Image (tube, helix red, strand yellow):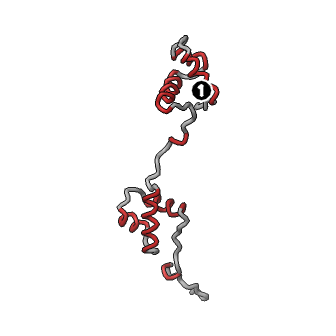
Amino acid sequence: MRVVLSQDLRKRIVQTYDLGLNSRLEVAERYGVSLGMVKKLLSQRKRSGDLGHRYRYCGAKPYLDNPRKEHLAKAVAAQPDITLEEIKDALKLDCTIQAIHYALVKMGLSYKKNAARQRARQTRRKNRP
């Protein structure tokens, strides 16, 4: 089970280690965290000088960043009836059709069918044989 360490506990772990009286393993046992967590905190402080949570750096980065979204908006503005597959081919995007769809939705653009493109519906018969 993952437990988020408070900012105060993170500072106390690093300060205890900085005193030089305890090894990393002893500090980990004292505060009830893993040795890996102590190593992570020390390397994070060395790299960035910060001990805060790093949630904003987790997860996959979006393929359609702002410059690509601008090209996407220009393509849709130039040809409003362009399909998602045509957008992918025209802009040479290496992502899924769904990713393009979600980006368009976030940008406030949507695809709406007009009456001319809808399937012809069969008329209802009153007198069935």
Residue assigned mark 1: 10
The residue furthest bottom is: 127
Q: What amino acid is found at the position of numbered circle 1 in the picture?
A: Arg
Q: Is residue 72 above or below residue 45?
A: below
In front here: 47 or 109? 47
Q: Position of residue 44 (x, y in %)?
A: 50, 30
In front here: 57 or 33? 57
- Choose top left, top right, bottom left or bottom right for residue 11: top right
Neighbourhood count class around disc 1 (C-alpha, 10 Å): few under 14, some 14–19, many 20 upward: some
The structure residue drawn at horizontal position 43% and vertical position 58%, both measured from the top left corner, is 67
Q: Position of residue 60 (x, y in %)?
A: 47, 46
The structure residue drawn at horizontal position 43% and vertical position 66%, both measured from the top left corner, is 84
The structure residue drawn at horizontal position 53% and vertical position 83%, both measured from the top left corner, is 122
Q: Position of residue 92 (x, y in %)?
A: 35, 61
Q: Is residue 103 above or below residue 78?
A: above
Residue 127 horizontal side relative to residue 102, left or right: right
